[in-house]
Image (cartoon, helix red, strand yellow):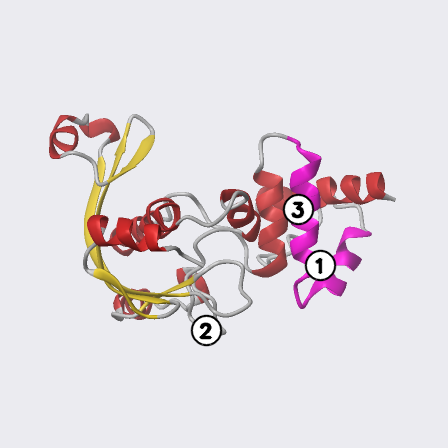
């Protein structure tokens, strides 16, 4: 649960966000975010924004109405966009909640893969990290997508296949990442289906699991890589 220190930081940094009742933070989140020299900076100084080279310049300032809740028994808070901004964009683009990186069951924002959340908060939850490293970059990407229809950091497939794709994208072949991914897959509703999939050696010429009709190597090759790494991790554990 967030602490008094977390709420003190929030009052100074984002005073329009307040704890309205226990386990609930609500209000308007106004942010600035800049891409400069390949890095993404939250609330950069105005001078840096003006001095950034146009070739690498991507600057967005925007406001979203949000509600952050921490349900009993959950390891991390959930965030919801409550101003209807994402719904308007989805309607305009003919997209679903899933397409907009929201969970269908409750509309919560998909801020990061479960493995990223666990690694980010491995030493304990910090509200400033949640807001400035997860929530604001999420809205930055949403604002950019609303204008360009392009997701800045690409997309992961939905459900367990997205977890596998995340693993396939990790540059460092750390067996710990594979074991962490497997743990989260086993917590999913479709775990039996996914475990059956892992018993089959993937081939690049197989049809992609996303249903596009393309070969896996030409569509979601990271899923193929992730399956291979999971199979290796399971073998090493047995």
Residue found farthest to the right: 238
**Local secondary structure at mark 2:** loop
Left or right, 175 with respect to 31, comes to right
| Residue closest to the eye, 12 or 17 | 12
In the image, residue 177 lies in the stretch drawn in magenta: yes
**Local secondary structure at mark 3:** helix
Q: Quadrant of residue 24?
A: bottom left
Q: In the rendered image, which residue does mark 2 sit on?
A: 106
- Residue for point 43% across, 66% down: 108
Q: Main secondary structure of the magenta part?
A: helix
Which numbered tag is attached to residue 211?
A: none
First reached walking from the N terminus: tag 1 or tag 3: 3
Q: Quadrant of residue 63?
A: bottom left
Using the numbered discs, state the Cα–Cα distance from disc 1 to disc 3 in whole angstroms: 10 Å
| Residue closest to the eye, 43 or 178 | 43
Q: In the rendered image, which residue does mark 1 sit on?
A: 186
Magenta-tinted stretch: 173-199
- Residue for point 58% across, 31% down: 171
- Residue for point 57% across, 45% down: 166
Left or right, 116 with respect to 237, comes to left
Q: In the rendered image, which residue does mark 3 sit on?
A: 180
| Residue closest to the eye, 36 or 74 | 74
First reached walking from the N terminus: tag 2 or tag 3: 2
| Residue closest to the eye, 33 or 59 | 33
Q: Is residue 51 visible to the viewer in this orientation of the structure?
A: yes
> Callout 1 environment at 10 Å: few (<14), some (14 to 19), or many (20+)?
some
* x, y percent for residue 81: 32, 66
In the image, residue 211 lies in the stretch drawn in magenta: no
């Amino acid at each position: 649960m967030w602490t008094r220190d977390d709420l003190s930081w929030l009052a100074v940094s984002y005073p329009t966000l307040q704890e309205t009742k226990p386990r609930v933070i609500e209000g308007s989140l106004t942010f600035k975010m800049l891409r400069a020299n390949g890095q993404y900076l939250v609330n950069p100084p105005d001078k840096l924004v003006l001095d950034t080279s146009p070739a690498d310049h991507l600057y967005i300032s925007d406001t979203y109405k949000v509600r952050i809740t921490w349900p009993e028994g959950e390891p991390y808070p959930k965030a919801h966009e409550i101003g209807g901004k994402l719904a308007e964009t989805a309607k305009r683009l003919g997209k679903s909640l899933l397409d907009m990186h929201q969970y269908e069951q409750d509309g919560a924002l998909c801020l990061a893969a479960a493995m990223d959340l666990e690694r980010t908060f491995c030493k304990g939850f910090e509200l400033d990290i949640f807001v400035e490293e997860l929530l604001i970059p999420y809205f930055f990407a949403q604002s950019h997508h609303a204008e360009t229809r392009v997701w800045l950091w690409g997309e992961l497939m939905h459900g367990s296949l997205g977890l596998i794709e995340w693993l396939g994208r990790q540059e460092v072949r750390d067996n710990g990442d594979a074991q962490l991914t497997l743990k989260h897959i086993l917590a999913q509703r479709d775990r039996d289906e996914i475990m059956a999939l892992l018993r089959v050696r993937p081939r690049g010429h197989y049809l992609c699991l996303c249903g596009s009709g393309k070969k896996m190597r030409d569509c979601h090759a990271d899923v193929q890589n992730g399956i291979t790494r999971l199979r290796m991790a399971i073998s090493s554990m047995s």
